[in-house]
C-alpha cells in the first residue's frame, strides 16, 4: 500500500474521531449506523471471522528476533 493512501486513511479516521469528540461509544455507534445504512442500500458487509486465523510458525517468529 502506498504511503499516501495510508496517510489519507489516517487523516479520515482522525477527522471522524475529532467530529465525535474522540468518544469511543459515539464512534462505534456512528460506524455501526453507517454499516446498517450501507447494508440496507445493498452493499455487501463481510462479517469478521469467528475465530482468529491459525498462526503457523509462531514460536519460530517469536524466537527469531529475540536476542
Image: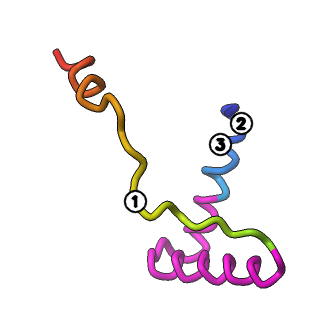
| Front of the two marks 1 and 2 | 1
Q: Gap in Å between the C-alphas at discs 1 and 3?
A: 30 Å
- Residue identified by numbered label 2: 4
| Depth check, front residue: 29 or 11 | 29
Q: Residues within 10 Å of mark 1 (few under 14, many from 20)?
A: few
61 relative position to 67: left or right: right
User: Is 57 a magenta residue?
Assistant: no
Q: Which residue is found at the position 16% from the left and 15% from the top?
A: 67
* 6 relative to 38 in the view: left or right: left
- Numbered disc in front, either 1 or 3: 1
Q: Are marks 3 and 2 in contact (CB under 8 Å)?
A: yes
Judged from the image, the secondary structure of the residue bearing numbered disc 2 is helix
At a point 71% along the width and 36% down the height, the residue shown is 4
The residue positioned 21% from the left and 22% from the top of the image is 63
Give how far apart the Cα atoms at labels 3 and 2 are.
5 Å
| Residue at the extreme top of the image, as rendered | 67
Crowding around mark 3 (Cα neighbors within 10 Å: few <14, some 14 to 19, many 20+) is: few
Whole-angstrom CA distance, mark 1 to mark 2, is 32 Å
As drawn, the residue found furthest toward the right would be 41
For the point 40% across and 59% down, the residue is 51
First in sequence: mark 1 vs mark 2: 2
Question: Which labelled disc corresponds to residue 10?
Answer: none
* The image quarter in which residue 32 lies: bottom right
Q: Residue furthest left?
A: 67
Which is the main secondary structure of the residues drawn in magenta? helix
Q: Quadrant of the N terminus?
A: top right
Q: Specify start and end residues of the magenta stretch as a single range.
A: 13-42
Looking at the picture, does residue 9 appear above or below residue 62?
below
> Can you identify the residue that label 3 sits on?
7
Amino acid at each position: 500500500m502506498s504511503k499516501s493512501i495510508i496517510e489519507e486513511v489516517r487523516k479520515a479516521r482522525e477527522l471522524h474521531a475529532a467530529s465525535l469528540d474522540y468518544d469511543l461509544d459515539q464512534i462505534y455507534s456512528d460506524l455501526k449506523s453507517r454499516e446498517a445504512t450501507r447494508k440496507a442500500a445493498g452493499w455487501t458487509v463481510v462479517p469478521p471471522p469467528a475465530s482468529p486465523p491459525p498462526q503457523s510458525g509462531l514460536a519460530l517468529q517469536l524466537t527469531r528476533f529475540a536476542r
